[in-house]
């Protein structure tokens, strides 16, 4: 069927293409901290029992916040295939690691299965002073050590925000571990025993985040970070 022709005296309208959207302005660079204007950057510590979804949350936060920096752990264990120094870990010799321990360079360190692991204090303070949020993914014991260190360091204390992520119950956590299918029954029991101890420490954290879907978890975490940046202790004073 042919479209009807416009009658005499009736204008024939031509459809014009929509103009392209204006280009997005790049976000202004964050100004570094100065003595009269302390940084509002956050040191975000996230801890969770195995199976709670911590790795997924951390990865989604990093994608959502491009200026957020993930702390790279130092270790004395040899690199595994595909691992890169300075990307996956800072690989150190046992002698170099010990020197750094003796010099007080680590904010937290421990030995696990014969290998040493540690977090350099400079890896926290340098980006914080540059105005970048720092994300630290550590266990409950490591989080307790960071809290102790921060209590004696004004910069770390001002920036520190701790979040504990877990499921609604241990039974839900057990179901998640079963779905992963990565552990034997004996290993799973050990993981759940450790998880019970870790979950009992949730009151030591600033926030308790009950895991739902990955989308819900990252949305709630971003709300926490946004609110923390608006605290009067971090916000820049308004001009009068």
Image (cartoon, rainbow, N blue to C red):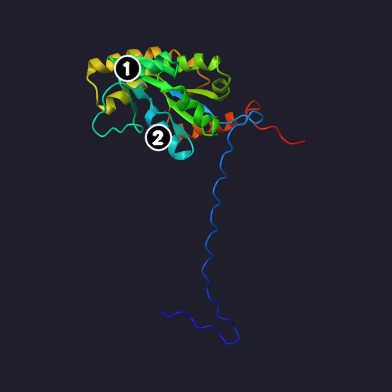
Name the one closer to the observer, 205 or 212.
205
- Give the image quarter of residue 172: top left
- Give the image quarter of residue 115: top left
Circles 1 and 2: CB atoms closer than 8 Å: no
Residue that lies at the very extreme toward the right in this rendered image: 240
- Give the image quarter of residue 180: top left
Q: How many marks?
A: 2
Upstream in the sequence, badge 1 or badge 2? 2
Mark number, residue 111: none
Provide residue 199's location: percent of width, then percent of height. Answer: 42, 16
Under circle 2, the secondary element is: helix
Residue at x 50% of width, y 31% of height? 127
The C terminus - image quarter = top right
Residue position marked by numbered label 1 in the rendering: 95
Question: Would residue 180 appear left or right of 156 to someone viewing this image?
Answer: left
Residue at x 32% of width, y 23% of height? 92
Under circle 1, the secondary element is: helix
Residue that lies at the very extreme toward the bottom in this rendered image: 8
Provide residue 116's location: percent of width, then percent of height. Answer: 33, 17
Residue position marked by numbered label 2 in the rendering: 59
Quick check: 158 above or below 222?
Answer: above
Provide residue 164's location: percent of width, then percent of height. Answer: 46, 22
Task: Judge whether residue 120 can be spotted in this image.
Answer: yes
Tell me if mark 1 has few (under 14), some (14-19) or many (20+) residues whose alpha carbon lies within 10 angstroms of its own.
Answer: few
Name the one closer to the observer, 211 or 69.
69
Q: Which of marks 1 and 2 is in front?
A: 1
Provide residue 183's location: percent of width, then percent of height. Answer: 24, 22
Q: Distance between the residues labelled 1 and 2?
A: 32 Å
Residue at x 27% of width, y 18% of height? 188
The N terminus - image quarter = bottom left
């Amino acid at each position: 069927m042919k479209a009807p022709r416009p009658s005499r005296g009736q204008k024939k309208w031509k459809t014009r293409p929509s103009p392209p959207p204006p280009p997005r302005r790049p976000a202004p660079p964050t100004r570094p901290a100065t003595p009269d204007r302390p940084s509002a950057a956050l040191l975000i510590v996230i801890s969770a029992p195995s199976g709670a979804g911590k790795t997924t949350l951390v990865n989604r936060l990093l994608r959502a916040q491009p200026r957020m920096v993930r702390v790279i752990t130092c270790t004395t264990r040899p690199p595994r295939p595909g691992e890169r120094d300075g990307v996956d870990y800072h690989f150190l010799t046992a002698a170099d690691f010990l020197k750094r321990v003796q010099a007080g360079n680590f904010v937290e360190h421990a030995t696990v299965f014969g290998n040493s692991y540690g977090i350099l204090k400079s890896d926290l303070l340098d980006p914080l002073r540059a105005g970048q949020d720092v994300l630290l993914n550590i266990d409950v014991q490591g989080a307790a050590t960071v809290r102790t260190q921060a209590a004696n360091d004004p910069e770390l204390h001002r920036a520190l925000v701790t979040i504990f992520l877990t499921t609604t119950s241990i039974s839900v956590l057990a179901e998640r571990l079963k779905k992963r299918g990565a552990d034997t029954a004996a290993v799973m029991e050990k993981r759940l025993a450790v998880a019970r101890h870790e979950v009992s420490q949730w009151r030591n954290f600033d926030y308790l985040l009950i895991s739902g879907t990955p989308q819900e978890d990252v949305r709630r975490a971003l709300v926490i970070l946004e609110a923390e940046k608006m605290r009067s202790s971090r916000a820049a004073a308004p001009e009068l």
